[in-house]
Image: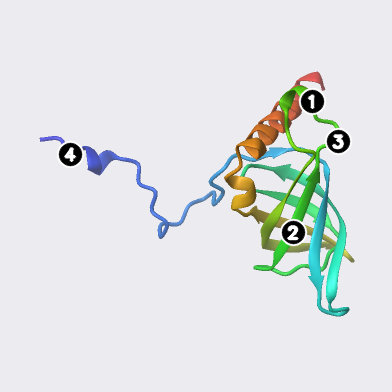
Amino acid sequence: MRQPYVEAKWDDPFETRDERRSVDRFEFPMEISITAPDSNHRTNLVGPGVTKNISMGGAFLYTKHDVQTNQRVRVRMDLDNVPLALCLPTQFEGDAEVIHVRTIDGRLRGVALRFSDSFTQSMEFALYVDYLRNLAAASSVAH
């Protein structure tokens, strides 16, 4: 007798995987706003970040913010150039967790973020990411 569960694809969180990302990412440079606590001044600093790639689950970006792994930050994406036909809000804003930080040169850092549910559970955000994916694909075909 054949046992289908033996041949099934298992998603075991304790098994190491070569690729830890559960969502496909694609390259798309865009400016976003990051709000992060600044312990030196006991306040929040707001500044820019430029994405290298993005997905429904997170983004990799460059910033001058001094963030640390496991830190929570606030992310805002303004939708200035999105066609009105998509009926999206003017911006997306929510929390993200810093997964990895790498110093590039001096103050510039490469930061991997994991988006919170305010992004990952939003159908509007899913539509926006799909729109960005299509723009990235069209751009790569044109070049």
Q: Earlier in the sequence, mark 2 or mark 3?
A: 2
Secondary element at image label 3: loop
Residue 81 sits in which quadrant? Answer: top right
Question: In whole angstroms, how far apart are the C-alphas of marks 4 and 2?
Answer: 47 Å
Question: In whole angstroms, how far apart are the C-alphas of marks 1 and 4?
Answer: 52 Å
Q: Give the amino acid at mark 1.
A: Leu
CB-based contact (under 8 Å), mark 4 and mark 2: no
Residue matched to label 1 = 84
Residue matched to label 2 = 74
107 sits to left or right of 139? right
Residue density around tag 4, few if under 14, some if 14–19, many if 20 or more, within 10 Å: few
CB-based contact (under 8 Å), mark 2 and mark 1: no
Secondary element at image label 1: helix
Q: Give the amino acid at mark 4.
A: Gln
Residue 99 disc label: none
Residue matched to label 3 = 80
Q: Earlier in the sequence, mark 2 or mark 1?
A: 2
Q: Earlier in the sequence, mark 4 or mark 3?
A: 4
Secondary element at image label 2: strand
Residue density around tag 1, few if under 14, some if 14–19, many if 20 or more, within 10 Å: few
Residue 37 sits in which quadrant? Answer: bottom right
Residue matched to label 4 = 3
Q: Give the amino acid at mark 2.
A: Arg
Q: Position of residue 26 (x, y in %)?
A: 68, 37
Question: In whole angstroms, how far apart are the C-alphas of marks 2 and 3?
Answer: 19 Å
Q: Which residue corresponds to the image point at 74% horizontal and 59% vertical from the top-left? A: 74
Observer-nearest of 94 and 1: 94
